[in-house]
């Protein structure tokens, strides 16, 4: 029957396949192959779930060995050896060297699962109900996380009001980069006629990804941490997409030298594209009763095996350092080769291996995406009106392929803007 099977039987809700109507069969590193044998270069990276590329050998071998040994796969939250090894490595090689003392919750395996438990915990600890997020935020599709997500279409699909206990504060970039967000939040809390209540927590993605690659400044993040300390509000960092070395440090908040109270991770923490999530919490926040939050697919042991291998790769290859080197290549290319092609109202923004070209025009951005696809480059859009071309290659992409993808973007922009 071929591809028609999807149209006939899969719900209309499917999305990405409309931008890239190919049927995939194979993937390695940064290359996809479709059923007809065509090759595509991947600058999308599973929306950040494939930081180490497709099917990295190091992780694959560990997975195959584990499967061959009939290692335990499903164990709910019972004790299991892969989980023991993951926790040990994560504590000793990732957290302790950064002076971070977090306990770990294993929620359900997706990003939105990690967010939901964080919100529940913040509300329970503070006995307050409101959570503040920023304009442009994206935190997931289940109702709690969706209430903090700004994307209009997704919010409307909720079918219920999302406004209770979830508040969006204008981010500095929301008003041409000049809005004093911290001063505004201070006023909201100090003025007894503001109509606002003190929130349990503020949630932030230090680089808004789906929001259109907006990099919050180091100073802003530090001021935010101080603000939260002053008013005894918990700070939650959503590392689901920007974490796991993409920004050039393992945790994206390291850049600002701040310590969040709660950290949400998913996507590339699973290493191989296998669903996995963790929520990190400061030790003193660990007040959940046993089983108070649960889920059947917490801690799939196959995910633990892959996640441990991904952390080993991170440490042994010093992946954050690799990202910093590639960041220079991308930054230089974008400034030298692409910026001169752009109109005055267009911008380049980014950090590490997460970059955006803001066209300030969704139609133009889509045309560029289509041109890229014609040249076999898979690349996504983000931001208000989908007006940002989002450059997100694998962190381990070969330099030659990185430059090839950038060249395709350049050619595509030339064709659209000229
Ligand atoms: C920053 C951020 N948080 C949360 C999520 C939700 O993750 P998931 O789609 O795995 O539920 C996403 C997904 O793109 C995300 O980018």
Image: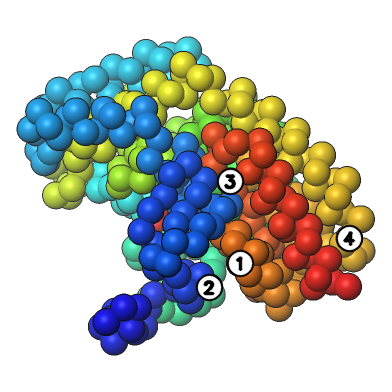
Disc 4 C-beta below 8 A from ligand 1:
no
Q: Is residue 53 left or right of residue 384?
A: left
Q: Are marks 4 and 1 in contact (CB under 8 Å)?
A: no
Q: Which residue is mark 2?
A: 19
- Classify residue 365 by image quadrant: bottom right
Q: Are marks 2 and 1 in contact (CB under 8 Å)?
A: yes
Mark 4 and mark 1 lie on one chain; the one further toward the N terminus is 4
Image-quarter location of ligand 1: bottom left
Q: Is residue 240 visible?
A: no
Q: Are marks 2 and 4 in contact (CB under 8 Å)?
A: no
Query: What is the spatial separation of the Cα atoms under label 2 and label 1, in whole angstroms?
Result: 8 Å
Q: Residues within 10 Å of mark 2 (few under 14, many from 20)?
A: some
Q: Which residue is mark 4?
A: 341
Q: Which residue is mark 3?
A: 393
Q: Which mark is residue 373?
A: 1
In the rendered image, the vertical position of residue 349 relative to residue 370, given as above or below:
above
Residue reaching furthest front?
Answer: 37
Mark 3 and mark 4 lie on one chain; the one further toward the N terminus is 4
Residue 105 or 67: which is nearer the viewer? 67
Q: Residues within 10 Å of mark 4 (few under 14, many from 20)?
A: some
Mark 2 and mark 1 lie on one chain; the one further toward the N terminus is 2
Residue 377 or 285: which is nearer the viewer? 377
Query: What is the spatial separation of the Cα atoms under label 1 and label 3, in whole angstroms?
Result: 15 Å
């Amino acid at each position: 029957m071929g591809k028609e099977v999807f149209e006939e039987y899969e719900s209309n809700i499917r999305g990405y396949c409309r931008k890239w109507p190919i049927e995939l069969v194979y993937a390695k590193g940064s290359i996809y192959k479709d059923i007809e044998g065509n090759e595509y270069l991947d600058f999308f990276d599973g929306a950040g779930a494939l930081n180490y590329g497709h099917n990295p050998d190091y992780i694959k071998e560990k997975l195959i060995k584990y499967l061959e040994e009939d290692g335990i796969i499903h164990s709910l939250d019972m004790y299991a050896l892969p989980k023991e090894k993951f926790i040990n490595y994560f504590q000793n090689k990732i957290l302790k060297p950064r002076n971070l003392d977090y306990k770990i919750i294993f929620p359900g395996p997706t990003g939105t699962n990690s967010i939901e438990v964080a919100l529940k915990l913040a509300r329970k600890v503070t006995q307050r109900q409101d959570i503040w997020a920023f304009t442009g935020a994206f935190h997931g599709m289940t109702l709690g996380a969706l209430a903090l997500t700004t994307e209009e279409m997704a919010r409307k699909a909720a079918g219920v009001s999302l406004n209770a206990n979830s508040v969006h504060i204008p981010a500095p970039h929301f008003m041409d980069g000049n809005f004093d967000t911290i001063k505004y939040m201070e006023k909201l809390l100090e003025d007894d006629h503001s109509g606002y209540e003190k929130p349990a927590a503020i949630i932030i993605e230090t680089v808004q990804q789906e929001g259109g690659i907006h990099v919050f400044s180091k100073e802003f993040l530090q001021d935010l941490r101080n603000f939260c300390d002053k008013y005894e509000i918990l700070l939650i960092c959503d590392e689901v997409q920007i974490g796991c070395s993409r920004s050039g440090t393992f945790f994206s908040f390291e850049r600002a030298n701040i310590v969040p109270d709660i950290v949400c991770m998913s996507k590339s923490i699973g290493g191989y594209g296998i669903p996995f999530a963790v929520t990190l919490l400061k030790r003193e926040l660990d007040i959940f009763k046993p089983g108070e939050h649960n889920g059947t697919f917490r801690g799939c042991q196959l995910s633990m095996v892959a996640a441990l291998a991904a952390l080993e790769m991170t440490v042994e290859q010093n992946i954050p350092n690799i990202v910093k080197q590639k960041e220079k290549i991308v930054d230089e290319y974008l400034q030298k080769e692409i910026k001169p092609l752009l109109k005055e109202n267009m911008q380049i923004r980014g950090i590490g291996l997460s970059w955006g070209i803001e066209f300030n025009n969704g139609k133009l951005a889509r045309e560029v995406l289509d041109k890229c696809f014609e040249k076999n480059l898979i690349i996504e859009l983000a931001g208000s009106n989908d007006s940002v071309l989002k450059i997100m290659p694998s962190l381990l992409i070969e330099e030659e392929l990185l430059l090839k993808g950038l060249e395709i973007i350049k050619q595509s922009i030339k064709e659209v803007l000229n």
